Image (spheres, rainbow, N blue to C red):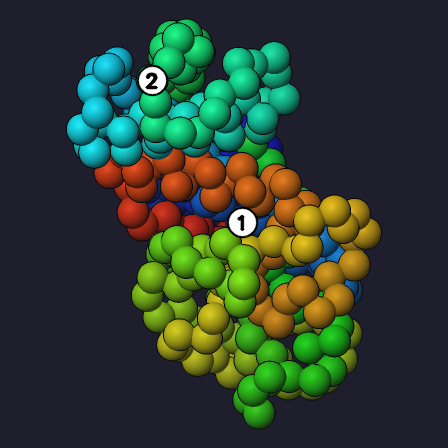
């Protein structure tokens, strides 16, 4: 889906894409196959202008260089294009400065968008064995939420930055679906990945209502973009707009 259509869909459902460098948009498939990663996560990124001061050893400048290195290496991997191999060390060497020129010419001032496979629903395991007596959680859509960086168990993740509204599905069948029962609170509805290296399209026990990437390497690129922006002090809260297809 093009960025223009994505913004139009959001507006149609009552939301605006936030004016921040990094936005997350999930598209919920209304007839999703049970226990499958068949929904789409859109990453929208507007590259900020970055100015570096080579040779400076101040903590602020080291953080800026580190942030740029994180962002640039994430961007070129997402695009899978030929790129300079940068070491993320906060030192502005010749490769970093050359990369900054490419970044400025290629990314700055343009909104770019990428799509990744993920799920907005629980796998069958937790549908049959809900973690709550009220039923398995499913994030309410359409809706707009705030994520912040954190951890999901032992892995890097985005965690709730505010109370989220969820449906409670307690019929214990193989479909995660909207119900008349809702609840608002902190439920650990995190945005995270599966184990690195897994390729199957089965959700299984990887989600009990979280938003989960099918491929770990793709999720790590999203984490790197966010961490780069945090290091640059450009953004600390990451809006997540969940839409119905």
Secondary element under disc 1, as helix, strand or loop, is strand
Label 2 secondary element = loop
User: Horizontal and vertical percent for residue 229?
Assistant: 33, 36
User: Which residue is drawn at the image coordinates 61% and 12% (left, top)?
Assistant: 82
Whichever of callouts 1 and 2 sits on the residue coming sooner in the sequence is 1
Residue situated in front as seen by the camera: 62 or 145: 62
Q: Give the farthest residue toward the right.
A: 200
The answer to whether residue 243 shows anywhere in this view is yes
- Residue 123 lies, in percent from the top left, at 71, 68
The residue shown at (47%, 71%) is 188
Q: Determine the CA span between mark 1 and mark 2.
A: 36 Å
The N terminus sits in image quarter = top right
Left or right of residue 113: residue 165:
left
Q: Is residue 56 above or below residue 244?
A: above
Judge whether 104 appears above or below 224 on screen: above
Looking at the image, residue 20 sits to the left or right of residue 116; the answer is left
Residue at 76%, 50% (x, y): give it: 198
For disc 1, the marked residue is: 26
Q: Residue furthest bottom?
A: 133
Task: From the top left corner, tell me how far across and down residue 2 is, in percent.
Answer: 55, 29
Residues at marks 1 and 2 touching, judged by CB atoms closer than 8 Å: no
- Looking at the image, which is closer to me, 68 or 118? 68
Nearest to viewer (mark 1 / mark 2)? 2
| Residue assigned mark 2 | 92
- Judged left or right of residue 78, residue 55 is left
Asked where in the image residue 184 lies, by quadrant, the reply is bottom left
The residue positioned 75% from the left and 66% from the top of the image is: 204
User: Local crowd at mark 2 within 10 Å, few (<14), some, or many (≥20)?
Assistant: many
Report if residue 9 is visible in the image.
Answer: no
């Amino acid at each position: 889906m093009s960025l223009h259509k994505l913004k139009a869909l959001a507006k149609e459902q009552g939301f605006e894409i936030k004016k921040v460098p990094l936005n997350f948009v999930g598209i919920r498939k209304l007839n999703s196959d049970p226990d499958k990663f068949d929904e789409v996560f859109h990453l929208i990124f507007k590259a900020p202008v970055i100015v570096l001061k080579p040779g400076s050893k101040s903590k602020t400048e080291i953080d800026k260089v580190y942030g740029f290195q994180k962002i640039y290496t994430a961007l070129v991997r997402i695009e899978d294009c030929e790129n300079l191999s940068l070491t993320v060390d906060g030192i502005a060497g010749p490769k970093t400065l050359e990369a900054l020129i490419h970044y400025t010419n290629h990314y700055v001032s343009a909104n770019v968008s990428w799509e990744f496979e993920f799920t907005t629903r629980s796998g069958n395991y937790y549908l049959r064995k809900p973690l709550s007596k009220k039923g398995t959680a499913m994030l309410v859509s359409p809706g707009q939420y705030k994520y912040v960086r954190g951890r999901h168990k032992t892995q890097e993740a985005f965690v709730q930055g505010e109370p989220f509204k969820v449906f409670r599905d307690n019929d214990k069948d193989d479909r995660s679906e909207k119900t008349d029962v809702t609840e608002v609170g902190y439920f650990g509805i995190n945005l995270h990945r599966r184990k690195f290296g897994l390729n199957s399209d089965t959700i299984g026990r990887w989600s009990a209502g979280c938003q989960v990437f099918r491929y770990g390497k793709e999720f790590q690129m999203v984490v790197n973009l966010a961490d780069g922006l945090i290091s640059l002090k450009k953004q600390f809260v990451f809006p997540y707009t969940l839409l119905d297809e």
